[in-house]
Amino acid sequence: MNILAIETSCDETSAAVVAGDGDQIKILSNIVGSQIKIHAPYGGVVPELAARRHAELLLPVISEALKKAGVKIDVVAATYGPGLVIALFVGLEAGKILALAWGKPFVGVNHLEGHLVSVLGGNAGLDVTIFDEPLVALVVSGGHTELVLVKRYGEYQLLGRTKDDAAGEAFDKVAGMLGLPYPGGPEIAKAALQGTLNKMTMPRPMMDSHDYNFSFAGLKTHVLYLVKKLKAEKVDLAKVTPDIALAFEDAITDVLVAKTMAAALAHQVKSMIVSGGVASNARLRQKMLAAAEIEGLRCYFPPNDLNCDNAAMIGIAGYLKARYNRYDDPFTLRANPNLKFS
């Protein structure tokens, strides 16, 4: 079964072709049109600009994905939420039109589920049977920080989520405070490599809250006041930026690891998945893998190119829905910017 998948939930215009056969999944093409340069001057995504650029890029991106894959399409899939509603609309409506024009079945994909199943796109020997047993998943990106118990494929229990800023959003905002470019996550990680641990102290928000929720607004505010204090003291911010970046990165990854491990142990699972843009952070990966090894747990990460928003992960999720005949009516499905795990 060959799936044409479309992703336009935020600021990446992407199309992919994914082939599924039983438990096996293969990515035949995955084309991403980035909008980073457009939004960088604003320090974040401007919805109207994102939607306009999606409309410009989508058909060329779809054409390239189809040409590279070179196969007949059996099903069309597109993200229908969560995300920016005017951005979602562009890709979703295009996907529905193509499905109707070609006479093919259509599936709408939950962007969060796409991140979750993206782990199937690059791990040798890993197939859909990973979802035959319970596991804990951390979806951590610019717009989402959610901890989920996956009882089996399609059956999810939300354990906790951020009460304010998502982890990736906090990275972006702190990077801006430090004068680092957008997107902030990779820039914070790069600066942190030159920092010295424990030169700066940072709080670990909700570390001892006895639940699985997160809060990063306070950590972001701590950096804001620290930067103001240093500037008032005439400290050269550029010289201390690596130490601040490292302290911030260390704090936020400590919280993510602690909450995820606590959930995994409490629910007695054998495996964990960590996905989303922030899952590409090397410090988070090192800490999570080390903690998992101590407890005898397996921990899986998607390849870095599948962590950021892309259509391949939507194609994987689309194949799983189609495999179980969970098709959607293109005449009635609407974009849902507040869609959750269900």
Image (cartoon, rainbow, N blue to C red):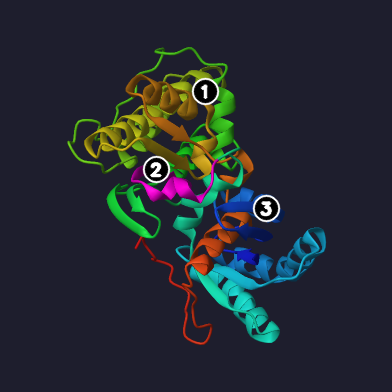
Residue located beneath label 3 in the image: 27
Q: Is 62 displayed left or right of 147 in the figure?
A: right
**Residue ID at (62%, 55%):** 312
Tell me the distance, in whole angstroms, between the alpha carbons under discs 1 and 3. 40 Å
Between residues 188 and 238, which one lies in front from this camera angle? 188
Q: Quadrant of residue 101?
A: bottom right
- Looking at the picture, does residue 224 appear above or below residue 102? above
Residue 243 coordinates in the image, percent (x, y): 48, 18
- Looking at the picture, does residue 216 appear above or below residue 95? above
Does label 3 or label 2 sit earlier along the sequence? 3
Q: What span is colored magenta in the figure?
A: 126-142
- Name the amino acid, label 3: Ile
Image quarter where the C terminus lies is bottom left
Q: Is 188 displayed left or right of 1 in the figure?
A: left
Q: Is 156 displayed left or right of 54 in the figure?
A: left
Residue located beneath label 1 in the image: 241
Between residues 244 and 139, which one lies in front from this camera angle? 139
**Residue ID at (51%, 71%):** 108
